[in-house]
Image: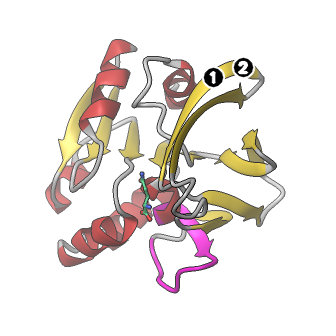
Amino acid sequence: MIVGVLALQGAFIEHQKMLEQLGVETFQIRNKSHLDKPMDGIVLPGGESTTMYRVLRDQNMVEPLKKIINDGLPTFGTCAGLLLLAKEVDNYKSEYLQTMDIEAKKNAYGRQLGSFKTVGEFNGQKDTPFVFIRAPYIVETKNDNVEVLAIVDDKIVAARQNNQFVTAFHSELTDDLTVHKFFVDMLK
Ligand code: GLN
């Protein structure tokens, strides 16, 4: 099993480490030609969505990336990655990849609560650690086939729609493999 991790900006090495602990090979996607490599899944990491999107656009990676996601490649978007995939971002007028039927809110916790750690239930798994860093959350799901996987303080913070899986939090910054295992199961 091999997963490409978008490595333009942000916390990509941490995802590679988590996946490698689960026996999954990884490689870094740094330009358009890397999107042509054979892969069983792709990770869009946390970082800054506007910056990441700008680099994707400048390197002509937007359309090929949208295509492989729309064609069904298992995709894991973390934090900024969630924003890149969301069909709508309610407080930010920019169009990212827009492949997933969710409406998200950017920097949704405001300045005071910008970053925090907590534990919660992920896909029925209690006490899963969550790390939020200037995180978004999902305001609304826009299709019945979007499955909600985690809720913190009444906000949706993880969801899946077919091949697309997103978390508002960073599990790659914890030592708990629960969330990455969920993604690895999607690869099979
Ligand atoms: N606030 C960032 C954004 O708007 C996301 C933060 C993160 O990925 N940790 O893209």
Identified at 72% across, 19% down, the residue is: 125
Task: Indicate which quadrant contains ligand 1.
Answer: bottom left
Residue located beneath label 2 in the image: 125
Give the Cα separation between the discs numbered 2 and 1: 7 Å
Q: Quadrant of residue 178?
A: top right
Instruction: Where is residue 136? Give x, y as percent.
Output: 57, 58
User: Dot 1 lies on which element?
Assistant: strand
Q: Is residue 7 above or below residue 174?
A: below
Q: Position of residue 159 (x, y in %)?
A: 67, 46
On the rendered structure, is 120 left or right of 44?
Answer: right
127 above or below 118? above
Q: Position of residue 54 (x, y in %)?
A: 27, 75
The answer to whether residue 41 shows anywhere in this view is yes
- Residue 142 found in image quarter: bottom right
Q: Residue at x 57, y 64 (%)?
A: 110
What residue does disc 1 label? 128
Q: Residues within 10 Å of mark 1 (few under 14, many from 20)?
A: some
Which residue occupies 27% across, 76% down? 57
The magenta region covers: 84-96
Q: Is mark 2 within 8 Å of ligand 1?
A: no
Position of residue 13 in the picture relative to residue 153 (left or right): left
Q: Quadrant of the N terminus?
A: top left
Please tell me whether residue 94 belongs to the stretch shown in magenta: yes
Dot 2: what SS? Answer: strand
- Determine whether label 2 and label 1 are within 8 Å by CB: yes
